[in-house]
Image (cartoon, grey):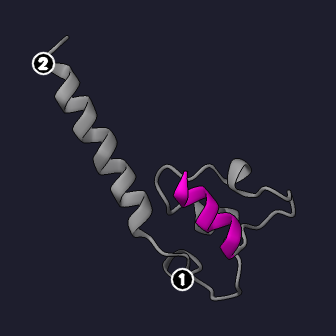
Amino acid sequence: MNKMLPVLAALTLASGTAFAAMTFEEVDINKDGVVSTEEAATVEGLDFATADVNGDGAISVQEYQAAVAE
């Protein structure tokens, strides 16, 4: 078990880095100013339902930035 802890820690850090590395502009593929469910699916670790705070079916730049900051 003790040998697995460094591996799990590295995987956790690596996945967080990949998630944070994608900017809103990179995720908003069609450049309509929001991230759709399809676009959000390209971001590993992004939970659309949680990120879409106001429940309008799209993730705004502010919602995306808040989700990435968590």
Residue 21, percent from left and from top = 38, 67
Q: Amino acid under label 1?
A: Glu
**N-terminal label among 2 and 1:** 2
Whole-percent x, y for residue 30 in the image: 62, 86
Mark 2 falls on what kind of element?
loop
Residues 56 and 62: in front is 62
Answer above or below: position of 32 versus 45.
below
Picture residue at 75% right of the left edge, 58% below the top: 52
* Percent x, y of residue 42: 50, 63
Q: Is residue 34 above or below residue 1?
A: below
Tell me the number on the disc at residue 3.
2
Write down the region rendered in magenta.
61-70
58 relative to 3 in the view: left or right: right
- Asked whether 70 or 27 is in front, the reply is 70
Name the dominant secondary structure of the magenta segment: helix
Label of residue 56 in the image: none
The residue where tag 1 is placed is 25
